[in-house]
Image: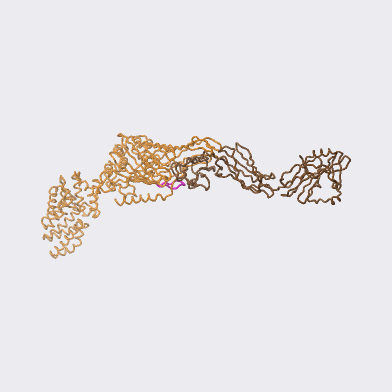
Chain colours: A brown, B orange
Amino acid sequence: MTHSLFRPFMIIAVLSVCVSAAAADRRQIDFQSSSGRGRIPLSAMVMLEPTLPAPALVDEPEYTRGDRNTVYWESGDVIDAAGATGYEVILFEVEAQIENRLLWGFVDVGVDSATFRDLPEGIRILYRLRYYAEGPTGGYAVSHWSEPVHSVQDWSRPVLHAWNIRDMQHASGMAWVVGQAVWIRVVASDSLYGGIMQIAIHEESRFSQDTTFYDIESPAVYMDTLIPYPLRTPANEPIAISLWVVDVAGQVSDAGSIVRHEFFWWTHEEETPGLICYPNPFHPAAGEKSVIKMNQPGIESGRIFDPFGNLIIRLTKPAGTLFFEWDGTNREGRRVARGGYIFVVDGRQDLYCKIAVY
Amino acid sequence: MKKHTAKICWAGWLLAASLPLFADGESGHAGLFLRYGTGGRALGMGRAFVAVADDASGVYWNPAGIVGAERAEITTLYSNLYYDSQFAHFGFVLPRPRENVKNRLAHFLIGPSSAVGFGWVGLGMSGFEQRTATGQLVGDFGIGENGFLFGWARETMGLWGVLQYGLHIKLVNQHFSGLVQSAGQNFGKGGRDWSGGMDAGFTFQPIHTPILRIVSLKYLLPLRIGVAFQNLIQPRWSGPGDRDTFPRAIRAGLSYRFNLKDWFSSTWGITSWLEDVSFLLAVDKEYITDLPSGTYFGIEGQIPVFESVFFQPRFGMNNQTENFSAGAGLSVPFTHAAALRLDYALVTHPHLPVDSRFFMTVQFGDLKGPGYFKKLARRPENTEKEARNHLLRITALYPNGEVDFAAGALAGFQDTRHARRYFELTGGLGRADYLLADARQLLKEYKIQRGRKRATQAAEEYAPLFMQRDNPLRDRELIDFGEALILSGYANDAIEVLGQVEEENLRTEFLLATAKRRDGNLDGALERFQNAIRRYESEQDKNSMVSLSFIQSGEILLEKQDYKSAMLYFETLLRNHDKALDPEYPRVLIFRDDYCLDDARFLLGLTRIFDGQYEMGAAGLIETHRFYPGLEYGQVVADQAASILTALSSEDWKELDAIARSLYYGYKQAQEVDAR
């Protein structure tokens, strides 16, 4: 379906429709018919009474993004209908009613669309279509107006303020969660004239390149919600999740606000009463850190020893996390030598993890 | 001695109490498995071992110490450390491998003053989970670290002490076994790494070290100083893009063996077996590059249980890992040329489980102890210096059964300059003889108080033997004992001791006479002096006791106012002495003239005056001054010479008698001072 801009004199900012004024207008509208090009005075056009059947505009979406809108119709159907009555369609006239203002213009036959620009936001705009035809005897007729279609312009993209995965542990290297099913919190907003309609979640890994769309039952101008999401990637594999929101007008949140979270997940089966240290061995000289993961609350500190029982360093856990981190240094801040070390939870000699420095 | 014991005990407790205030732990540096320590003795003693190191673990602690091992020795250890880590050690030391080596280089390397050793130390850790950066489990792996140590040491010594020095070359290896190359993990050479290094050390045992000569050998010989330099050539682990270099360290330490018999008087009633009990105290201080220093303290007892069987309890502290350690060992001979030592060490930890370890050491081969050095000392091909050094080596191993032999030989021939120190070490009759000789010399020099003190010390050495039921003292020793008692003022005891002499000689007679006179028994004394004169007058020389017997006989008779008899003794003495005199000799002290002639002439003059022979008496007094101007009574007479001549010229015999009596009174006063 093609559409075109109006002819130059149809690009009207504000136009008051006044028949008496139009009657004094000496402008003529050019048209193309089977008998060639013609011209009809505008003043004659406005005097015509609608006698031909009304055309139909294609339904409009409730919201249209941006400040312009294109309306569509099936010109072939209209031509056929007019031809059945012996008339030849010579022009289409399309109109946009914006509160107490009208925008209108003429479109050649064979064109199935018209685009209105600089439309205001948040106003329900009515669109109508009719056509002009030439009779077998050379006289002109006009159709009734089509049933109006309407749409509201939505200038603004939705804004994705923040999103995160609940209970994600942000350890050095890569974050992680426990369990394949995660909860994602999304905070987004749109303009007062729009609403968040959909959330898109894109999962990227060696095993998956999928995007999942979640429709919002009741689009909201502001949302702060938790949505469940089952990860498709297997456990202990790097995953990158990116997320964006779509408003009622189909606009997508700014690409610049699309944040990727890279992480992996642990199966629940590995939550044995113990500790897991990874990566192991790790290379602190290259900036790596060892993450000591646990699943038990209430553990606040532990100590790293060498196999001879020398204390290397005491670690404390950041509040609200389930892991310790060790950068491979001792109490004096010096990097330890290559070899094996043991992390032991304070007061729990049975909870330990062997860490190798490479 | 009690003061010394108390001071050392206080110092030890203060050190032990201050240890928890020190910063704790060395942490995470390369090569710790080579510095941790091995050996049941060392670990039970809190790893304070650098000045000891005299067994197969010396290859590990201080390479210099291996030359101090008394036997070839193999020691092993296998221990589970924390959380399934394993630590193993094998050590072998061969002290003084070859006794007769002609080649100079071979003699230097493996001769009787050298030692070689080998050690292996291994650390194994297993049960590591290899995991990727996303926690994915790849498999299991382990880490192994090994060190192969090849040690050599040599001993050099002199009068200043025993210096042992040594070094060991080490090859070290680290291996990560079972690692799998996985996503995101690169292990370069597959986790294997070899490197080499070198340590050195020395120990020093002072003997006659100048600055320490004020300390008796008995309390100096148990001291050892040790210093070890680790990683002079530094091994290193090479990882991808970085290196871990073994840090340099210096460890210095002292060890001291307290032999209880030297610190507690035998009169305290301690049973005899405690005399073989000793305690080894060791303190080490360690400085490591860029790491906190370490302080180590340990103590080991050596308690004889049966013959050649020793029980060795141990205790140690340090400010590093364990805080406290304890242990025990039992050393048992199982053949005539081998012994087995079993050791156990218990190590505590404030945060980790208690760890206990067992060790076994086999000692075999010829014992390179005092008997060995005695054999070396008697080799006819020895130079004087070599013989002396072998004897010094025996002495340095104090206490042992050959110390008396070695010290006696050194004091008598090889090193007479330090005779006093050797006799102080051995105590008993050797020391007594030395002290008595010293007392005599001091008394001759008129250092009365010091001389008396020496004589008292000499008597204290004889006394315990005399008090024994079987009294092993022979006649000569009894006579020496008697003389020491007389010189120290115990005349009555001297009479009792001298009465035990079986075959009396001139000296016995003289000393008994002197003792009786000091005891107030003048008649008994006179009888003994006269016996001495009668029996030995023909053997008289200018300085003999016969001369002294004459003088003392004359003095007693003078005291008894038997002037005629007294004059007889004085005249006989002077006549006998005059026969040997050169008429032209200047009568000064530098000749072998002895004071008794001064006394005799002086007393003769006085006696004649008392006997009424005033002119001859006065002349005799003046002769004292003329013949012996520098001697005491020559001076006395000189002071009175004018008065004597005046009385003589004026024939004022009463005045002359008064002068004589005042001179005699002064003489008696001087004698009483001497006797005190």
* Image position of B196 (left or right of B671): right
Q: Nearer the viewer, residue B126 or A148?
A: A148
- The answer to whether residue B3 is magenta is no
Query: Does the rendering let one see residue B170?
Result: no
Q: Nearer the viewer, residue B460 or B209?
A: B460
Q: Position of residue B146 (x, y in %)?
A: 44, 37
Q: Quadrant of residue A130?
A: top right
Q: Which residue is outermost to the right? A: A137
Tell me the quadrant of the picture where the C terminus of chain B can be found.
bottom left
What span is colored magenta in the figure?
A: B284-295
Q: Position of residue A188 (x, y in %)?
A: 64, 47
Q: Position of residue B1 (x, y in %)?
A: 29, 50
Q: Position of residue B271 (x, y in %)?
A: 25, 45
Q: Nearer the viewer, residue B509 or B596?
A: B509
Q: Nearer the viewer, residue B612 or B523?
A: B523
* Image position of B372 (left or right of A257): left
Query: Does the rendering let one see residue A100?
Result: yes
Question: Across the whole image, how many numbered discs are drawn on residues?
Answer: 0
